[in-house]
Image (cartoon, grey):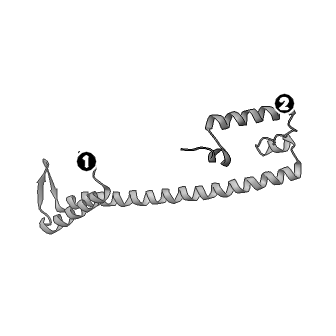
Amino acid sequence: MPRVSKVSKAVGAMRALAGVVKHFEQGQRYPLGGETYTRDEIVAVFQAQLDAIKQVDATRAAATAAVANERAAAARAHELTHYLKMAVEGRFGPSANAWADFGWEAPKKRGPKTLQGKVEGAHKARATRVARHTMGKRQRRKIKG
Protein backbone atom coordinates (compact mmCIF):
# COMPACT_ATOMS: atom_id res chain seq x y z
CA MET A 1 0.00 0.00 0.00
CA PRO A 2 1.55 3.34 -1.01
CA ARG A 3 2.16 5.99 1.58
CA VAL A 4 -0.44 8.75 1.54
CA SER A 5 0.80 12.27 2.14
CA LYS A 6 -0.54 14.44 4.91
CA VAL A 7 -1.94 16.90 2.37
CA SER A 8 -3.84 14.12 0.61
CA LYS A 9 -5.23 12.92 3.94
CA ALA A 10 -6.37 16.44 4.84
CA VAL A 11 -7.99 17.00 1.44
CA GLY A 12 -9.72 13.63 1.64
CA ALA A 13 -11.03 14.39 5.13
CA MET A 14 -12.31 17.82 4.05
CA ARG A 15 -14.07 16.37 1.01
CA ALA A 16 -15.62 13.56 3.06
CA LEU A 17 -16.72 16.11 5.64
CA ALA A 18 -18.32 18.30 2.96
CA GLY A 19 -20.07 15.29 1.40
CA VAL A 20 -21.44 14.08 4.73
CA VAL A 21 -22.76 17.53 5.62
CA LYS A 22 -24.36 17.93 2.18
CA HIS A 23 -25.93 14.49 1.70
CA PHE A 24 -26.55 13.00 5.16
CA GLU A 25 -29.52 14.21 7.16
CA GLN A 26 -29.30 15.49 10.71
CA GLY A 27 -30.65 13.09 13.38
CA GLN A 28 -30.69 9.92 11.28
CA ARG A 29 -28.44 6.94 11.97
CA TYR A 30 -26.37 5.38 9.20
CA PRO A 31 -24.92 1.84 9.31
CA LEU A 32 -21.19 1.90 8.51
CA GLY A 33 -18.80 -1.00 9.11
CA GLY A 34 -21.14 -2.93 11.38
CA GLU A 35 -21.98 0.07 13.56
CA THR A 36 -24.45 2.89 13.24
CA TYR A 37 -23.41 6.54 13.30
CA THR A 38 -25.23 9.84 13.28
CA ARG A 39 -24.15 12.59 10.92
CA ASP A 40 -22.54 14.47 13.82
CA GLU A 41 -20.49 11.41 14.86
CA ILE A 42 -19.20 10.98 11.30
CA VAL A 43 -18.35 14.68 11.10
CA ALA A 44 -16.55 14.43 14.46
CA VAL A 45 -14.29 11.62 13.17
CA PHE A 46 -13.16 13.58 10.11
CA GLN A 47 -12.85 16.81 12.08
CA ALA A 48 -10.65 14.99 14.62
CA GLN A 49 -8.38 13.89 11.77
CA LEU A 50 -8.10 17.48 10.47
CA ASP A 51 -7.40 18.78 13.99
CA ALA A 52 -4.69 16.15 14.50
CA ILE A 53 -3.01 17.13 11.22
CA LYS A 54 -3.06 20.81 12.25
CA GLN A 55 -1.64 19.92 15.67
CA VAL A 56 1.22 17.97 14.07
CA ASP A 57 2.00 20.93 11.81
CA ALA A 58 2.03 23.33 14.74
CA THR A 59 4.17 21.00 16.85
CA ARG A 60 6.63 20.47 14.01
CA ALA A 61 6.89 24.23 13.43
CA ALA A 62 7.51 24.78 17.15
CA ALA A 63 10.19 22.08 17.17
CA THR A 64 11.89 23.60 14.11
CA ALA A 65 11.88 27.02 15.76
CA ALA A 66 13.27 25.57 19.00
CA VAL A 67 16.10 23.82 17.14
CA ALA A 68 16.97 27.03 15.28
CA ASN A 69 16.97 28.91 18.59
CA GLU A 70 19.23 26.30 20.19
CA ARG A 71 21.68 26.43 17.26
CA ALA A 72 21.86 30.22 17.43
CA ALA A 73 22.49 30.09 21.18
CA ALA A 74 25.17 27.42 20.70
CA ALA A 75 26.91 29.50 18.03
CA ARG A 76 26.93 32.54 20.29
CA ALA A 77 28.24 30.50 23.24
CA HIS A 78 30.95 28.97 21.04
CA GLU A 79 32.11 32.40 19.91
CA LEU A 80 32.07 33.74 23.47
CA THR A 81 34.02 30.68 24.68
CA HIS A 82 36.78 31.52 22.18
CA TYR A 83 37.06 35.07 23.54
CA LEU A 84 36.82 33.85 27.12
CA LYS A 85 39.76 31.48 26.56
CA MET A 86 41.81 34.38 25.21
CA ALA A 87 40.92 36.45 28.29
CA VAL A 88 41.78 33.60 30.67
CA GLU A 89 45.13 33.07 28.97
CA GLY A 90 45.86 36.80 29.14
CA ARG A 91 44.90 37.05 32.80
CA PHE A 92 46.21 33.78 34.24
CA GLY A 93 48.66 32.57 31.61
CA PRO A 94 49.01 28.89 30.84
CA SER A 95 48.38 27.90 34.48
CA ALA A 96 46.65 24.53 34.44
CA ASN A 97 44.72 25.29 37.65
CA ALA A 98 42.87 28.28 36.25
CA TRP A 99 42.07 26.45 33.01
CA ALA A 100 40.81 23.42 34.93
CA ASP A 101 38.41 25.63 36.88
CA PHE A 102 36.73 26.46 33.56
CA GLY A 103 36.73 22.80 32.51
CA TRP A 104 39.38 23.26 29.82
CA GLU A 105 42.79 21.77 29.24
CA ALA A 106 45.66 24.21 29.53
CA PRO A 107 47.29 25.04 26.19
CA LYS A 108 50.37 22.99 25.48
CA LYS A 109 53.70 24.68 25.13
CA ARG A 110 55.39 24.30 21.80
CA GLY A 111 59.10 23.98 22.31
CA PRO A 112 61.74 24.62 19.69
CA LYS A 113 62.02 21.81 17.15
CA THR A 114 65.15 19.73 17.32
CA LEU A 115 67.26 19.11 14.24
CA GLN A 116 66.17 15.46 14.25
CA GLY A 117 62.49 16.51 14.34
CA LYS A 118 62.98 18.84 11.39
CA VAL A 119 64.68 16.11 9.34
CA GLU A 120 61.89 13.63 10.10
CA GLY A 121 59.28 16.22 9.12
CA ALA A 122 60.99 16.87 5.79
CA HIS A 123 61.15 13.12 5.02
CA LYS A 124 57.47 12.70 5.87
CA ALA A 125 56.54 15.66 3.67
CA ARG A 126 58.44 14.19 0.70
CA ALA A 127 56.87 10.77 1.27
CA THR A 128 53.41 12.35 1.35
CA ARG A 129 54.02 14.20 -1.93
CA VAL A 130 55.19 10.97 -3.58
CA ALA A 131 52.23 9.00 -2.24
CA ARG A 132 49.71 11.62 -3.40
CA HIS A 133 51.54 12.35 -6.68
CA THR A 134 51.73 16.03 -5.76
CA MET A 135 53.76 18.12 -8.19
CA GLY A 136 54.80 21.72 -8.49
CA LYS A 137 54.07 23.88 -11.54
CA ARG A 138 57.46 23.20 -13.17
CA GLN A 139 57.05 19.44 -12.70
CA ARG A 140 53.61 19.56 -14.27
CA ARG A 141 54.99 21.50 -17.28
CA LYS A 142 57.42 18.67 -18.03
CA ILE A 143 54.59 16.15 -18.43
CA LYS A 144 53.74 15.52 -22.08
CA GLY A 145 50.47 13.73 -22.63
Task: Check whether the beta carbons of the residues at disc 1 and disc 2 lie within 8 A of each other.
Answer: no
Residue 58, position as x, y percentages in the image = 42, 61
Q: Which SS class for mark 1?
A: loop
Circle 1 packing at 10 Å, graded few (<14), some (14-19), many (20+), is few
Left or right: 96 as drawn, with respect to 103? right
Query: Which amino acid type is marked by label 2?
Result: Gln
Three-letter residue code for mark 1: Pro
Helix, strand, or loop for circle 2? helix
In the image, 63 versus 49, the foreground residue is 63
In this rendering, which labeled residue sits more in front, label 1 or label 2? 2
Q: Mark 1 vs mark 2: which is more N-terminal?
A: 1
Rendered image quadrant of residue 124: top right
Task: Residue 37: give x, y in percent of width and height.
Answer: 16, 56
Quarter of the figure that contains the N terminus: top left
The answer to whether 20 appears left or right of 54 in the picture is: left
Q: Residues within 10 Å of mark 2 (few under 14, many from 20)?
A: few
Pointer 2 residue: 116
Q: CA distance from mark 1 to mark 2?
A: 67 Å
- 75 lies above or below 136: below
Pinpoint residue 3: horizontal percent, then vertical percent.
28, 49
